[in-house]
Amino acid sequence: MLEKIQLNTKMEYILQEVNLELLPTEIRKHNLVSWIIGFTSHSKDKPSIYDYSDDYNTFFSSEVNRLIQSSIVSNTTYYLASLFHLGRQWKTSLSAIDLIEQALQETNLKKTVYENRSHIVEVIEKLELSSLLENLDADLEKVMESILKKALDDHRQKILTAKLYWQIWKKEVQDYQELVNYSDFKQLHYSISRYENYEHSLKEDFINELINLVTTDFLNKELYSTLNKETGMRLKKSIDRSALQDLYLFTSILNDLFESEEERTHYYNLFLNRYIHRLHVDIVSIKKKSNRRNAKKTIDW
């Protein structure tokens, strides 16, 4: 009789492990991959890493946390997706190279020619090219060998390209990890939200750290531009960060933090200048969606 058993794990974790098996060992076992997955797994259930549950003054914690989450989710989602993009290509080419090298062995090459000979002869006879039947086996071996060697070179080049992307990925993710993990932002946020009488310089440090954190964007990095240019890779899910909503949240934070209009304008412009690429992407996306809706209405009418 079959008995029901309960697995002490989640289906999401199982699927994640299955997906990781699609990657080369060098990628799968790297600590940066574990870090990225740690951020993206169960992200809907996890609070922001900057959340505070104390009873002190947290007059803008909600806006800050939403802004931070928007930035981190966007970046980590992209880096995870791009990781699987380059990793699957790498692993696929490794498997293909193994199969091609086996096929190039003399006995396997002759076997391949033998198994396909009758079909090739039939085609040649239909085309009335009987002269090609002379030395057919030797010619077929040369053609087959040439095709397989070309495929071998192609897959080796794909691995070299994937390794290049991997080096770029590691550098960018390591920089981002250091920014998130070792930023002074968390302590500054805690200090400001906990005490009402803080020095003005603390506010300046806080807002500068916040700008640095939330405007660090994969859109401005080498990996995105390289993959987009060379492979046409576009990841809609990771680009759907609302830049206009982020700008609204940042403006609200400035209003809570600074009384001086001059200071608010200064930091607003600083944020805007560093965030202009993301805003451009957001506005273009909104225009495209609007055009599609208008086109649909026209068709329906």
Image (tube, grey):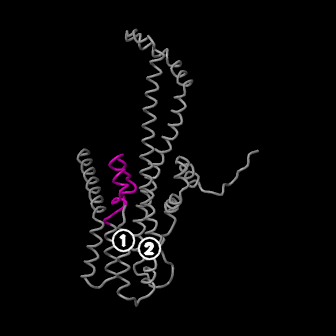
95 relative to 201, above or below: above
In the image shown, does 231 or 286 lie closer to the viewer? 231
Instruction: Estimate the x, y position of residue 279 in percent, counting from the top left.
Output: 29, 63
Amino acid carrying label 2: it is Ser
Amino acid carrying label 1: it is Asn
Secondary element under disc 2, as helix, strand or loop, is loop
189 relative to 282, above or below: below
Magenta span includes 222:
yes
In the image shown, does 31 or 35 lie closer to the viewer? 31
Q: Which label is found at residue 212? A: 1
Q: Which residue is mark 2?
A: 183
Left or right of 16 in this view: 208: left
Measured in 3D between alpha carbons, the distance from the residue under mark 1 to the one under mark 2, in whole angstroms, is: 10 Å
In the image shown, does 83 or 138 lie closer to the viewer? 138
Magenta span includes 44:
no
Disc 2: CA contacts within 10 A as few (<14), some (14-19) or many (>=20): some
Instruction: Estimate the x, y position of residue 198 in percent, counting from the top left.
Output: 40, 88
Instruction: Estimate the x, y position of residue 81 in percent, counting from the top left.
Output: 44, 53
Q: Residue at x 35, y 77 (%)?
A: 207
Instruction: Name the chief secondary structure element in magenta.
Output: helix
Q: Which is more N-terminal, label 2 or label 1?
A: 2
- Residue 12 in which image quadrant: bottom right
Q: Residue at x 43, y 64 (%)?
A: 175
- Residues tagged 1 and 2 counted as in contact (Cβ below 8 A): yes
Segment colored magenta: 218-244
Instruction: Estimate the x, y position of residue 217 in percent, counting from the top left.
Output: 36, 63
In the image shown, does 268 or 251 lie closer to the viewer? 268
Q: Residue at x 57, y 55 (%)?
A: 13
Secondary element under disc 1, as helix, strand or loop, is helix
Name the quarter where the N terminus is drawn.
Answer: top right
